[in-house]
Each structure stands twice: as C-alpha cells, then as structure tokens.
Image: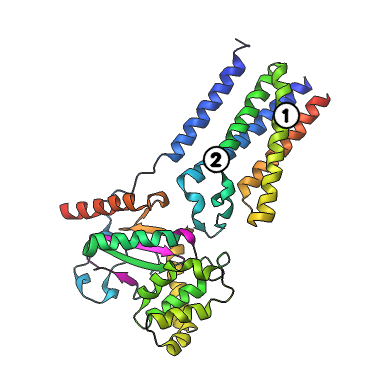
Amino acid sequence: MKRLLPFIIILAVLGIALVSAWYFTRTIPAPTTASGSQSQQPSSRGSQATQTAAEPVAKGAPGAEPAHVLGPANAPARLEEFGDFECPPCGLFHPILVEMHKEFGDKLQITFREYPLVPTHQHALAAASAAEAAGMQGKFWEMHDLLYDRQKDWKTQFDVRPVFEGYAKEIGLDVERYKRDLISDYVAKRITLDGSRGHSLGVTGTPTVFLNGVEVPFQSLQADQLRVVIQREIDSAGKR
Amino acid sequence: MRRTWLYGTAALLALLGLADAIYLTVEHVTGQSVRCTIITGCSEVLSSSYAVVAGVPLALIGGAGYFGAFSLATLAVFGYRFAATLLMPLTVAMFLVSLWLIYLQAFVIHAFCQFCLFSALITLLLLVVTLVSRRL
C-alpha cells in the first residue's frame, strides 16, 4: 500500500487539477431572463421619443441623462454597454455591436455609457469627452464610431486633441463650439455620472455589457453568442 | 528525516504553483485576460504574444511543470531516489524560465502581472528547498 500511496496522491491531484480547470473554463451559461425583474418591463410611456422616458436598463445609480441610446425604449432586448474608447477589446466589440444593431433593428436598444479607465488609458478621458462634446451637437454616435474605428491611429499619439478636432470636422461639427464644449462642466458631469452608474453596478472592466439588466459574461461577447442571448430575450418577451 | 520534510515542503509549494497556473490558464482560456480592468488595465502580460508558446498558453505549460514538480517531490517523500534526482533539473529549468519571464515583463512588455510574479516566487522557493535538500 505504501508503495502505491504516492501514485494515488499524484493521480488525485491531477484529477482535482483537471476537474477544477474544467469547472472554471466551461462556458458560463448566458444569462437567462431574470424572471420577475421589473427592470425589463418596457415602459408604456417609453414609446415617446424622449430618451429620458426610458427606464434604466439595469438597477443602480442613474447615469447621465439623456443617455446615448440607439433603438426604441420599448425594445424587448435592451443592452447597455460600459465602454472605454481606448480599450482594445472595446474596439473589437464595436463592430459586433454594429452587426447586432443592423440585424435586430427595433428589437434591440443599445445604450452607451462612458467608462474611461483613466490611469491606465491616458487618452480615454479625452476620447470620452470628445464623444460627449459631439453629443452636445447631436452627433455622439458618429464620434463614437470614429473613435472606435480609428482607435489604433490615435492611441499611440502624444497629443490627441488635434486628432479628435479633425474627427469633429469630419463629422460636420461646429469645431469652435466643440472645443468649448469639450472642457465644459456638462461634459465632465456626464462622464462622472456614467462612471458612478457603472461603479454602482459593480463594473470593474470594459467592455461590460448588461442585457435587460443582467450582465453578459465577457466571454459571451462574441457575435454568435451574443446573437443567441439577444434572440432569447426577444423570444421570451414575445411569450409574455 | 529532514529531507522528507523538505520534499514535503517542495510538494506543497508545487501545489500552490499549480493552483496559480490553473488560475492563469483559466483566465487565458476564458478571455478574461484580455479585458481592460480598473486594477490592471488591459492585461498586457497575459494578452501579449509571449503568453502563448506554439499555440499553447504558457500558463498551461507552467501548470504541467508544477504538476511534474509536485509528482517528483511526492515520490521523493516516499523515498524514490530517482525522483529526487530529477526534481533538481526541473526546478532549475522552471526558475530560469521564470527569470526570463520577469525580464520580459520588466523590459519588453513594461507591465507586471501579480500572478506571474507569484509563480516566480514559488519557483524561487522551490529551487531553494531543492538545493537545501541536496546538500543534506
């Protein structure tokens, strides 16, 4: 028995190691519909055009109002992204979200929240401000798309201000006004409010995505998996 | 007798290293390592090209190394002399790889990953314990 004991111990450790690795790597099931959660009940008033009428998609502190929203407030699938324009995985997630928006149309509502990871990403705050300043002229999404699409171009620059001003010009903003808005309290406040909302929801990284109030695991933020999760929300809303 | 204790310690250290390596492998496989977070920023280390060797996550290779060290140390505790002999070159190799990885983190990637540093500390302790046991 004593001769076998070390081999038994070794095999046991190997077994435990493999089982624990398997346990943690198995695909975390995508969130099922949080039954009974009022947060996903589309507001009957929400069909009005005003974005402020939309209920917050997830619980937590309110973010900046009006939020940057694509799609109707009464969409069965309501997605809220906390993003950082300088974060590479957010940049990779952007085309996936564009694809989802095209595919699901009015069935999917997309909200973007600023979550610049300031000390690590030196230009993240400047990028968030640029998008918010563009938002003040009604072109948030245009700037949002440009910032993500050209992330690689500006990320490594020392001074990003002229680059972003160039983008502002490109999307047809009043550049002088954009430059004033960039340093306004309004822009700063919006970013802080979105950040507080993220903080209250326990967001620690980007991109963090909530779908109808439930966080979508990071590893499910691939087009094929996200599509399934969104479709599931739409289907379950149809049954109600 | 003291030697048995030392090999026992080595086995425990290797277990800690194994747990660390499993954690890192899971992070790597699930993609958490490439996410940007408040604490670590984009985990430059785990998402760097150095985190993969010929398509295999480095953390997994580390896990295999620790498992090997654990097996040899356990066998050594039970008096298998060949295991004690083999443990030495393995720990030396693991320590050298750790040194290389610290060099990469400090001078090439310019970012440190706590769990990788923990692994390096474990290999250092493993080396010390193994060296001492050989001297006895």
Whether residue B111 is visible here, answered yes or no, is: no
Label 2 and label 1: CA atoms lie apart by 23 Å
* Relative height, residue A120 to residue B87 (above, below): below
* Relative height, residue A139 to residue B4 (above, below): below
Whether residue B46 is visible here, answered yes or no, is: yes
Residue B75: image quadrant is: top right
Whether marks 2 and 1 lie on the same chain = yes
Looking at the rendering, the stretch of residues picked out in magenta corresponds to A68-89
Q: Which mark is residue B89?
A: 1
Residue located at (40% from left, 88% from top): A174
Amino acid at circle 2: Ala
Amino acid at circle 1: Pro
Q: Which mark is residue B54?
A: 2
Q: Which mark is residue B76?
A: none
Q: Position of residue A138 (x, y in %)?
A: 34, 81
In-image side of B131 versus A204 (left or right)? right
* Relative height, residue A77 to residue B120 (above, below): below
Residue located at (66% from left, 52% from top): B105
| Along the line of sight, the residue nearer the viewer: A223 or A41 | A223
